[in-house]
Structures are given as C-alpha cells and as structure tokens.
Amino acid sequence: MKIPTTLDMMRQLIAIPSVSSVNREFDQSNRAIIDLLANWCSGLGLRCTVTPIPDHPDKYNLLAVSGGSGDGLLLAGHSDTVPYDINSWRYDPFTLTEDNNRLYGLGTCDMKVFFALVLTAYQQILRQNITLKHPFTFLATANEESNMAGVKALTEKPRAGCAIIGEPTGLVPVRMHKGIFMEAIRLHGQSGHSSDPDFGKSALDGMSLVMMDLLQWRKELQEQYHNSDFLVPVPTLNFGHIRGGDSANRICGECEMHMDFRPLPGMNIDILRGELRRRVREVLLDSGLRVEFISLFDGIPPLETKVDSDLVILAEKLTGRGAGAVSYGTEAPFLQELGMETIILGPGDIDQAHQPDEFIGFDRLQPMMDIIGKFIAHYCL
C-alpha cells in the first residue's frame, strides 16, 4: 500500500505527454499515463479496469474501485491535455517546475494534479485502518479535450451515487454549466460571370440570408431563455468562420460557415440542432441552392444539479462557497446521464487552463486534499 509522495506523483504525471486533439498531427496515446495511475491505484488496493476506447486506437479509460456495498463516491478527471506551443513557454511543459509558490507544467491546472491529490487523500484515509462501508471509485478518462470519447464510452453506472470532477474551478463548487455543439453549413450554388446574376446561383447571397435568419433566431432564444446564475445569462450562437468564392467578378459557387451554440440548462441540443437545420432549409427553399450540414462537434449537454441536492449542500459546506455556474463544458452531463449527481470542483483556475506556462498555486493543494478526504468520509465511511 505504498505510492509515491504527492509531489512525486505530480512530477511523473506531468512528465508523460498525453495530448488529445482532433488534429492527428498532435494527437497522442494516453496509455502510459493510464498504466501509471493503474499501478498506483493497485498499490492502494483498488480493483482496476483499463478499457480501450472504441474506434480510438491507443486511447484508454481507467476505472478503479474499492470494496463496500451500495453506492459510494466517484472522483473523476481526464488524463489528456490540450496541444501546446513550445515557443510560448518559459518553462518545460513536461517538467514540474516549482517557482514563486506555484507549480508549472502542462496539465498542472487542467488537470493531472487532481489525480495526485485524490490518491493522496485516499491513502490518508486507508492509514487510519478504517473499512469503507461504500465504494470509492477513481475514474481517469481519455480525449476530454477533443471529442469526449472516453466518458461517452462508459455504458454502465459505476458503483457511485455521486460524482465530483476535478476540473479547475478555484475550489468553488459548480453545479451548472452551459452545453455546446458546433455545426457547419455548406451551400452549393452555381458560379458564373458577375455581370449578370442569372448566369449563376450565389451561395454567398444564400448564406447572408441564412445568417440573418439565425441572428433573428438567436434574438428570440435570448428573449425566451435567461439564467442570471451565469456570467453570460443567455444562450449564445457564434458565427466563427466563413469562406466562399474566389474572385470579386465571379458569382460565388460555394460558401461554408462554422458556428458554435452554447445552450443553457433546460435546452436540448438535439432539438436545437434540428430546429437550426429546419430554419436553414426553409430560408433556402426557393433559392436553387443545395445545403449540406456537417456536425463539427456532436456536443456536450448542459448540466444542472439541483441546488438542494445532498452533494451540492455538502460541497457548499466544505468549501464555504455557494455553488455556481460556468460557460464551459465538462464530462459531468455524461456522468449524470448514468445516474449520478455530479458537480465540478477542482483546485486550479480556469484562466490558467490551455495557457502557456500553465500553473497551480501551492496554496490550493492542501485545501483540495482536505475537501476530498471529507467527501470520501461522508459518502464511503
């Protein structure tokens, strides 16, 4: 029942590259980090299952479970990081560097350090020679930063009634977040000489009509849906990319636009995507243009865990902070769909995530371990 010190675990985790990306040039396997975590979990007496992710070679999940009956607590995180630009870093991304009361390295904040804190807190409970009445479950997933393939591969509810994901929240519990999906609209028309519109069918003209209609739809949705718990209290629809045509004196034959939609809790991604496509088809009904829809990202559903749930109440008590809401997405809705109350609570700060010289403050480590220990005591003892 011996594992490395907390700092040594952090050093080893940060030293292992585990980038996930939709760009194959940057994408890497997470097997080495999963095997490392599984070795430590086995050393703590946990039963480990390493599972390959379907259709994603060299990507794996780890589920490690203690004894006990009934439902206990699941502590979860993702084993991957985003890509990095080495020229923007002052520190080595793969060397845990202590400086100015901070720990620097790729994944310190988001979110490899959390794994070390969880295993340390669990070890401290074991040293008290206390038998867990309910199961303690440790989950490390793949591909959270790219396509959520790891958490989506979970098909059965772990032996847990509650789950905590250690994403960076600054030690503030989060019970709600917006969802997100991304869509591309590609219009096919007919190019021709710009001197006469009848020589072709302008895909760019068609896209302008589409954009005007979607802007009106966005306005309607923002009037209908509002949640003041969010910094941006309305759903958002962003046009992030558009490309079409090749010359000012040619009718545009093809045009493509990319967008992202961030719905509030209570809004359904499948319904929204269906309505978006219906509206676009209706706008283009008599245009002579052919429309193609491409799902750039299937999506993350919005999350809402009830404010009066036992998990939220306990989280607020242990942190001394009211549970809040954020606009970024996490794996939490997928765990919730498996039947677990779920919140997000971690030691890092979101403004450090995905940044050069990513870091976490030393002052966040012990408070997070103390909180984790109290959660384990509450749900597993």
Image (cartoon, helix red, strand yellow):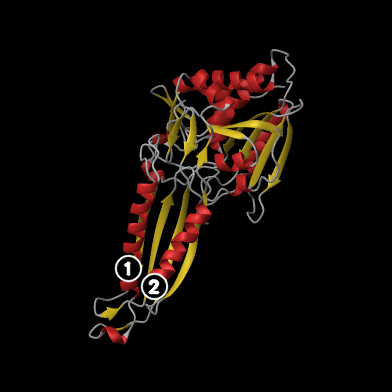
Instruction: Name the residue tied to disc 2.
Output: 284
What's the residue at 39%, 80% (across, down)? 288
Picture quarter with the C terminus = top right
Q: Is residue 122 left or right of residue 91?
A: right
Image x and y of residue 311, in percent: 57, 26
Instruction: Please tell me which residue lies in front, 299 or 136.
Output: 299
Image x and y of residue 312, in percent: 53, 26
Q: Distance from label 2 to label 1 (Cα)?
A: 8 Å
Q: Secondary structure at mark 2?
A: loop
Mark yes or no: residue 22 visible. no
**Which kind of residue does numbered mark 1 sit on?**
Leu
Extreme residue toward the front, this view: 224
Residue 234 vertical position relative to residue 366 in the rendered view, above or below: below
Q: Residues within 10 Å of mark 1 (few under 14, many from 20)?
A: some
Image x and y of residue 328, in percent: 44, 42
Q: Is residue 191 left or right of residue 97?
A: left
Instruction: Name the residue tied to disc 1.
Output: 209
